[in-house]
Amino acid sequence: MPLTDRVAARRRADLVAALRAKGIADERVLAAVGSVPRHLFIPDSSLLTQAYDDVALPIGLGQTISQPFTVARMTELLAVREGDRVLEVGTGSGYQAAVLAALGARVFSVERHAPILSRTDQTLGRLGIRVRTRTGDGTRGWPAYAPFDAIVVTAGGPAVPPDLVAQLRDPAPPRPDARLVIPVGPPDHQVLHRITRVGPDETRDETFDGVVFVPLVSGEG
């Protein structure tokens, strides 16, 4: 049964409170999560009762809509400012892209599954959320729109793709250094890395939470 607007709004408020209790401190990120109707990004109507639970849910073709805490945590680590050019690798349901757009980012998103992207484009269009998307190999980034202020990868791989690091812009005041947030590790467990470009040929690598994502697949397999 579809959620009413009133019930969905109440569930989002509860979700925001839960994320704050779990350690998400950026109020802009919490407000963005609170503004995005996650239930509209879940294609299986039988799962709508779980739409605002802090869990990942299937969206078809072996892909998932990420756990809200993970979305909020990765967005917090990106430190997105209004007007930032943000590349997302792995459009999936479109939920992460919608949260980034709610922060005022200009979002560019690459998805390798054409059927999922077609459905997601329709969802984003119905909601009036502007995200530029394409089907392709996300490990190659999107050179035509590079460089980016921030890049987020919503799939886990064994290493950081060098093409993504290359598409981070060089430091340029007054904006902070460009950031890449990506899960790195084996299929059953990854660690969030934040790669920050601190100079034309210099980056800083920080590690954060343990996560589990669907596999990041390149054109080479």
Image (cartoon, helix red, strand yellow):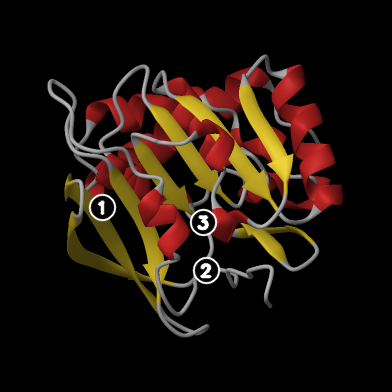
Q: Residue at position x 59%, y 73% from top?
A: 215
Query: Quarter-wise, where is residue 127 in the image?
Result: top right
Q: Is residue 160 left or right of residue 173?
A: right
> Circle 2 is placed at which residue position?
213
Q: Earlier in the sequence, mark 3 or mark 1?
A: 1
Query: With respect to residue 14, does 114 lie above or below?
Result: below
Q: Residue at position x 49%, y 40% from top?
A: 87
Of circles 1 and 2, which is in front?
Answer: 2
Q: Is residue 145 left or right of residue 23?
A: right
The N terminus - image quarter: top right
Q: Amino acid at mark 1?
A: Lys
Check if mark 3's residue and mark 2's residue have beta carbons within 8 Å: yes
Q: Earlier in the sequence, mark 1 or mark 2?
A: 1
> Circle 3 is placed at which residue position?
154
> Circle 1 is placed at which residue position?
22
Label 3: state its secondary structure. Answer: loop
Label 3 crowding class (10 Å Cα cut-off): few <14, some 14-19, many 20+? Answer: many
Query: Quarter-wise, where is residue 149 in the image?
Result: top left
Q: Earlier in the sequence, mark 3 or mark 2?
A: 3
Q: Nearer the viewer, residue 103 or 48?
A: 103
Give the CA distance from mark 3 to mark 2.
7 Å
Q: Amino acid at mark 2?
A: Phe
Q: Nearer the viewer, residue 6 or 129?
A: 129
Query: With respect to residue 52, does 84 lie above or below?
Result: above
The C terminus - image quarter: bottom right
Q: Residue at position x 52%, y 83% from top?
A: 187
